[in-house]
Structures are given as C-alpha cells and as structure tokens.
Amino acid sequence: MTFNFLLNNLFTYRDRRLRGWRILSGLGSFYAVCGLGAAANVGVAAYIAGDHSWWLAGLAGAAVSAVWNYAMSSIFTWSTPRQGALKTAAAKAS
C-alpha cells in the first residue's frame, strides 16, 4: 500500500503532490481509504460468490474497490484547499 501511495503521489496526482510532513498525514488517510476499499472488495465478492462463479465475484470485488480507492483517495488524500480558504489565508498574511 505504501508503494502504491508513493506511485500515486509521483504520477497520478502529480499536480497535487504531497510534500514534507503532509506526506505522513496523506499516507494515513490513504491507508484508511484503502482499508475500507479492501473491506468492500471482500463484502461484494462474498455476496456475489453465493450466486455466481468465483472469478466473477473476484472481478466485481476488485472493480468496486478500485473505483472506491480512486474516488475517495482523490477526495480525502489529495484534495486541494478551496479557493475561499486560499483567499482568507492571503488576506490574513497581508
């Protein structure tokens, strides 16, 4: 998971790359998001395996967790500050 985080930080979210101490909090949120994605993977696969073949259940679980991990890590790990927050910080600095 750590290697995946570092690759995402280098390539996928290059424009929002985490640096310094922010990389540690980003890694923690990435672990949390992917942990929930793993649980969703197992849950979906177990549910589908009751009625279908094992490979279809595995494929469905992997698809659900891939979409979940991408969407949620984009929001929680690599989100950028909102414009309002940037303007407020700039106003306080001057």
Image: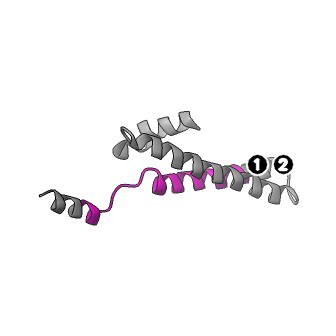
Image disc number at residue 54: 2
- Compared to 22, does 92 lie above or below? below
Of the pair 88 and 38, the residue shown nearer to us: 88
Name the residue nearer the viewer: 31 or 6: 31
Is residue 42 shown in magenta? no
The majority secondary structure of the magenta stretch comes to helix
At horizontal 28% and vertical 63% (from top left) the residue drawn is 85
How would you rate the neighbour count of disc 2 (Cα within 10 Å): few for under 14, some for 14-19, many for 20 or more? some
Residue lying farthest to the right in this orientation: 50
Residue 65 placed where, x, y %?
Answer: 64, 52
In the picture of the structure, the residue carrying the numbered disc 1 is: 58
Which quadrant is the C terminus positioned in? bottom left
Q: How far across and down, in percent of the image, does residue 49 sit? A: 84, 55
The single residue placed furthest to the bottom in the displayed view is 84
State the image coordinates of residue 90 (x, y, percent, origin top left): 18, 58
Q: Tell me the SS state at disc 1.
A: helix
Tell me where the magenta segment starts and ends, as one range. Answer: 60-86
